[in-house]
Every structure is written in C-alpha cells, then in structure tokens.
Image (cartoon, grey):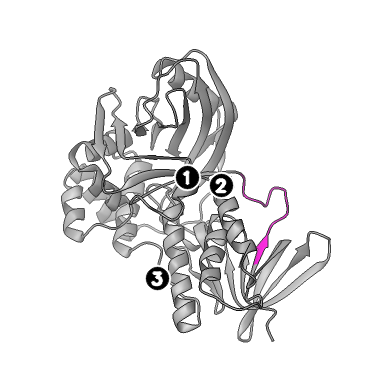
Amino acid sequence: MHDTEIAIVGAGAAGLSLAYRLCSATTGDTPAITLIDAPQGPLRPPERTWCFWEKPGGEFDAVTSGGWDTLRVRGPDGTPITGSAAPLRYKMLRSPAFESFVTRHLDAAPQVRRLTATVHDVCDLPHGALVRGITQQGEPLALRARWVCDSRPLPRLPPARTTLLQHFRGWFLRADRPVFDPAVADLMDFRTVQPGHGLSFCYVLPSSPYEALVEYTEFSAAVLDDAGYDRALRSYVSEQLGLDHVEVRRTEQGVIPMTDARFPHRAGPSVVRIGTAGGATRPSTGYTFATIQQQARALTTAWYEQGRLQSPPAHSRRSLAMDAVLLRALGTGRVDGADFFTRLFGHVPMERLLRFLDGATRWDEDMRIGLHTPVGPMLRTAAELPWLRRRPPGPTTQRPG
C-alpha cells in the first residue's frame, strides 16, 4: 500500500517543474503527488536567475523578468558581434516569480500535497520506494511511494575525464546615467582577464536604460573568493561600461559543475533522478532550465500514457561527445576559450548556434559548425579521449581573485 503515487524530493526548478506538469495530467480529489520541500536553511535552493531561449509565447512569459530578440558577443578586443535570435527569444526568469507561478497552480490542484521535511535517504521497496527523513515539526517521515523523483544534489560528482567549474557572481545594479540598451543582451563579453586554462566573460541583461544584471562568469578549475568576484565586476563596470557610481541592489552567486561524467538517470527501479542530479545541465554551457522542462514533459507523458516514469537521456550522445571534447580542450589549455566562442559567434548564425547549444541541430549542421573551431587541437583531443580514465574529481578549491 502506497501513501502516494509519486513523491518528488526537492522543490527547486526540477521538482516544481515536474509537479506543475504532473498535476495537469492527473484528475480527482485524492492526492497522487507529494512534493517534499526542504525547510528554510542551507538545503533550500537560494534565489536564482535562469536564462533560456524559446519562441515567443511561452507558458512562463507572464512571469519572465526580461526578453531579448537581439544578442551581442564582444571579442577580447571589444569588437561586437550582433545577431538576431529570431524566431527564438532569449529570456530571463527569476526563481521567486517562477515559484509563485507554480505554487498558484499547485494550490488549486487537490491531487497535489506539499510537505516540508529534510529527506535523509530514499530506498527501494518491492514495487516502490521509501522516503525517510524529519519533518519541519521534528517528526520522523516515512513516506511510501510507487515512484520517487529525487532532485537533491549528488553528495559527490561521478568520475570524469574532465571537470571544470562554471562559477559566477552577478550584480543587479542601477546606474547613475542611461548606458544600457534594453533591446540588446550581451551574451558574452570577453573583455575580462582570462584564466590560464578555461575562459571568463561578463554578460549584461538590461531591463531599462539604467538597470541591468551584470554577471561575471568563469570556467576554470577553482572558484574565486568573494573579493575576487567583486574586483572583476568593479573593473568591468568601470572600464568597459564607463560607470564610476552604481547602486548594487541585489547579488547572486553560484557554482555549476561542467563535467563529462555520466549521470545515472535512476537510483533504483522506482527512483528517478531529475534536474542537475539527473544530468540536465549541459556540460559545455551550464544551461539547465530548458532541459529540465523537456525532462519534466517526457516524464509526465510516460506516466500519463504508460503509468510509469521514464524519460530519454537529457542530452544526446552526440551532444555529450562534442561537449567532452570541448571541456578537455579548455581544461588542457589547447584552445583559447575566448577566441573559440568569439569565432563561433562570428561565423555561425545566432539562431543556429542557439539551437546547437540546445542540442537541436542536425549532424550536418554540427559538422559545418565544427569547421569554425580550431580543427587540429579539437581532433587531437577527440582522439585521446577514449584512452583516458574517468577519475573522481578532487575537492573544489578556492583561489583569491
């Protein structure tokens, strides 16, 4: 006897997205879906900004914080490369707005119930699984479910041939004069100090002539300390944007693993991993939100049509193979990251490149895109990858900026 049909562990982007889609595929007044959120504290995801691209008229458009049809990349010398994303649109969504949107739908769905608890473990049962933990009131939790979807971060990353970190700090700022073009988003601006292996850039997402999210991002093996991120942001805002006085209204910071590790989609016959733990993060870019939506749709369709939870891998084998080559080439320093991406954006139409980053291009399009990369170093890297052992990544280190 199950207490619930589906238990979803974690109410971040992956858990909320799956609960939102599942509740639209269920009917009746009996709870069939239980969403378990962590209590306030370190286990609950902090506020986040997610960016993704899709056609206008998306289901979350009403709560997005901004959208741009024109994107720009600046090379290390400042040369701008501007292109149209049409028929796609680059969108920014803040996690509080997304959570409020989904919560309104869940509150109106009698087939969904919510619990607040710290989940300690999920273990298999015959024809189901058991979620164990402690509720917010301090009571033991033992929830039996036919299916469990677990979005909790893995305790450690799986073995990999290459593991880099995408680490970032962003300022939501207001300038003292109008310097931003609200119609144009700077996707990558490489006028930053580049690390020895990897790359760094700033991106600028303006919401008005005076306001923007300005974020410093780095792909490298070690994170910076807080002073290092702030120093990089102050330098960019002053030297590249020409602003000496800004009001920083809010900050965000995070670390995303960029790895060619294999993420198992299941932790047991009835336990499905979702979100980053289920491999939703694109290894070469760190983009996750759009893949989470694809993953949630696939799981919902399978449950609705087949009565079971299964979904295809988050990314195709071809995409993962190309990502593994790029990560290795960046990690070894064989390619200059800033030059690599500048060349791609300079030679490939913006819309096609966005589809490529989503894994939505055909193999012949991938081949043509590949011709605009440093072919020699990339081929050498591809040839050596099959002979490299996958090793557990070392502990995350911090270096002063």
- Estimate the spatial distance between the alpha carbons at disc 2 and disc 1, rounded to whole Å: 8 Å
**Relative image position of residue 219 (x, y in whole percent):** 42, 39
N-terminal of the pair, mark 3 or mark 1, is 1
**Main secondary structure found in the magenta portion:** loop
- Nearest the viewer among 390 and 166 is 166
Query: Within 10 angstroms of label 2, few (less than 14), some, or many (20 or more) residues?
Result: some
Q: Is residue 224 above or below residue 60?
A: above
What amino acid is labelled 1 in the image? Thr
Numbered disc 3: secondary structure: loop
Numbered disc 1: secondary structure: loop
| Rendering quarter of residue 341 | top left
Would you name the residue on which mark 3 appears? 312
Disc nearest the viewer among 3 and 1 = 1
Marks 2/1 in contact by CB < 8 Å: the verdict is yes
Would you name the residue on which mark 1 appears? 64
Please name the residue shown 54% across and 63% down the image: 20
Asked if the magenta segment contains residue 38, the reply would be yes
Left or right of 251? Residue 355 is: left
- The stretch in magenta equals 35-46
What amino acid is labelled 2 in the image? Ala
Disc nearest the viewer among 2 and 3 = 2
